Image (spheres, rainbow, N blue to C red):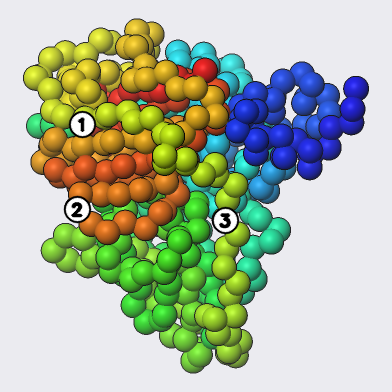
């Protein structure tokens, strides 16, 4: 048997005929690649201080800290985590944006069993892409995420440019009453519109936290929108900032932050050049809506490092397959509202309504009665999703397992951004191209979780 090194494996996985879905966890690979000691990721119910009203009960987290830990991985290196379920309902983990083998994708019924209270599941994969990603359950998702189970993933690339500091921000809201306790997670009339918004906004489970960064230094800010509903428009006040990556992938071309709108599930990487003088405050704001909201601030400390934004080498592109537009087959995908009806109950949670549909089929996902796949795709072939939003709402549409490239839009000039989530505007038509290089069943759904759970979910099958 030839010796398999990581290098040859990486090469093999880059070839379209052999998606990394094929091998990474097969026996052959297991024996060749030492699997590291799994990181223990245990779900827990805790009390946490999120408001001035005193501790909030029934908060869910991973581990024992007051926020799910930032999980660090290295591009191309095997990562292992043992999910132990310490809460009183089934759960799973989905590694949002990380291109994992299908069995590791965390979607109950479709690809893995859900994990009962007290049971565990071992996740093992090697993230092929560097960048900012995140993790969350895919079972009773609205409640479990709403109560806290959303964490950030940083996949490092040893070849990344040198920053003087890194700040990771987990952006999300909570549905709490004046007494600091959870109120109903959603309202059906809002689920049928833009979704139900939280009442308390946090960054890293804190209100407007401040972090120190060296004066005159270059900061890599990684922000993940892990909220179930809210769409953000960012602004940085008090320093120069440029967008370096979106959804884990380097931007093809710099552009103004003010033009950017990002939805639930999306990530933003910024390079920020701190002011030279000490004690200067830089703020990251959300300017969507009527009043700008400060999300977090950075304070400059120490003598100026006098760095220059132009010192930064560009980020290395991720090894995402290039769509062959000429030969690509088109798959039509229409997002619509549906006549109200009751959706099937499921152990992984049902909101009890259908409001939305993909190609006229409402499906809430995470149920034992999957509909037929949207399309059966051939491993290694190029596809273009012709997606059309027939609704008056904005939808962050997320594809599991494969990254797509935004090719064109009826609404605006697009750059060929690689991503896993596209925020489609009302009446927009967009083309998303991708290579079907990962075997298995891959969910596609709106990441406004109420939309997902009331019908805006479907999946592709790659064979
Ligand atoms: Cu982050 Cu299926 O989702
Ligand atoms: Cu939606």
Residue 32, percent from left and from top: 84, 28
Which mark is first along the chain, 1 or 2?
1
* Label 3 packing within 10 angstroms: few (<14), some (14-19), many (20+): some
Q: CA distance from mark 2 to mark 1?
A: 16 Å
The CA span between labels 3 and 2 is 26 Å
SS assignment at label 3: loop
Q: Which residue is mark 3?
A: 317
Q: Quick one: which residue is furthest to the top in this view?
A: 369
Closer to the camera in the image, 388 or 315: 388
Residue 390 lies left or right of residue 60; in this view the side is left
Does residue 83 sit above or below 227 in this rendering?
Answer: above
- Foreground of the two, 334 or 44: 334
CA distance separating discs 3 and 1: 31 Å
Which residue carries the number 1 mark? Answer: 335
Closer to the chain start, of discs 3 and 1, is 3
Whether ligand 2 has any atom under 8 Å from the Cβ at mark 1 is answered as yes
Give the residue drawn at x 23%, y 57%: 412
Q: Residue furthest front?
A: 326
> Which circle marks residue 411 in the picture?
2
């Amino acid at each position: 048997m030839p010796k398999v090194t990581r290098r040859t494996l990486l090469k093999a996985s880059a070839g379209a005929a052999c998606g990394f879905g094929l091998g990474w966890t097969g026996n052959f690979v297991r024996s060749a690649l030492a699997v590291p000691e799994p990181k223990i990721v245990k779900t827990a119910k805790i009390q946490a201080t999120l408001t001035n009203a005193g501790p909030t009960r029934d908060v869910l987290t991973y581990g024992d800290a007051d926020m799910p830990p930032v999980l660090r991985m290295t591009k191309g290196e095997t990562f292992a985590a043992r999910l132990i379920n310490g809460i009183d309902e089934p759960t799973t983990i989905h590694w949002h944006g990380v291109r994992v083998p299908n069995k590791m994708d965390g979607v109950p019924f479709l690809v893995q069993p859900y994990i009962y209270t007290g049971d565990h599941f071992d996740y093992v994969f090697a993230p092929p892409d560097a960048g900012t990603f995140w993790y969350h359950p895919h079972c009773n998702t609205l409640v479990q995420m709403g109560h806290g189970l959303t964490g950030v993933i940083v996949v490092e690339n040893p070849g990344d440019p040198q920053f003087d500091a890194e700040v990771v921000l987990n952006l999300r809201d909570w549905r709490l009453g004046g007494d600091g306790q959870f109120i109903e997670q959603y309202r059906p009339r809002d689920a049928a519109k833009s979704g139900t918004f939280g009442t308390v906004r946090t960054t890293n489970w804190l209100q407007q936290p401040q972090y120190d960064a060296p004066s005159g230094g270059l900061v890599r800010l990684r922000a993940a929108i892990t909220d179930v509903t809210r769409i953000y428009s960012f602004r940085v006040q008090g320093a120069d900032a440029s967008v370096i990556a979106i959804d884990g992938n380097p931007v093809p071309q710099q552009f103004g932050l003010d033009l950017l709108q990002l939805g639930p599930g999306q990530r933003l990487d910024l390079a920020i050049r701190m002011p030279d003088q000490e004690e200067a405050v830089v703020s990251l704001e959300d300017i969507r809506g009527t009043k700008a909201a400060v999300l977090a601030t950075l304070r400059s400390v120490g003598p100026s490092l006098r760095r220059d934004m132009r010192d930064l080498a560009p980020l290395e592109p991720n090894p995402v397959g290039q769509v062959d537009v000429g030969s690509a087959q088109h798959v039509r995908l229409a997002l619509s509202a549906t006549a109200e009806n009751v959706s099937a109950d499921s152990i992984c949670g049902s909101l009890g309504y259908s409001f939305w549909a993909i190609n006229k089929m409402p499906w809430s996902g995470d149920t034992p009665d999957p509909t037929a796949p949207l399309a059966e795709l051939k491993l290694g072939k190029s596809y273009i999703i012709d997606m059309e939003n027939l609704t008056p709402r904005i939808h962050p549409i997320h594809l599991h397992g494969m990254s797509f490239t935004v090719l064109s839009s009826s609404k605006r000039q697009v750059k060929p951004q690689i991503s896993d989530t596209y925020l489609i505007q009302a009446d927009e038509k967009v083309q998303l191209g991708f290579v079907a290089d990962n075997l298995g069943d891959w969910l596609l759904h709106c990441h406004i979780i109420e939309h997902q759970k009331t019908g805006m979910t479907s999946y592709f099958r790659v064979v």
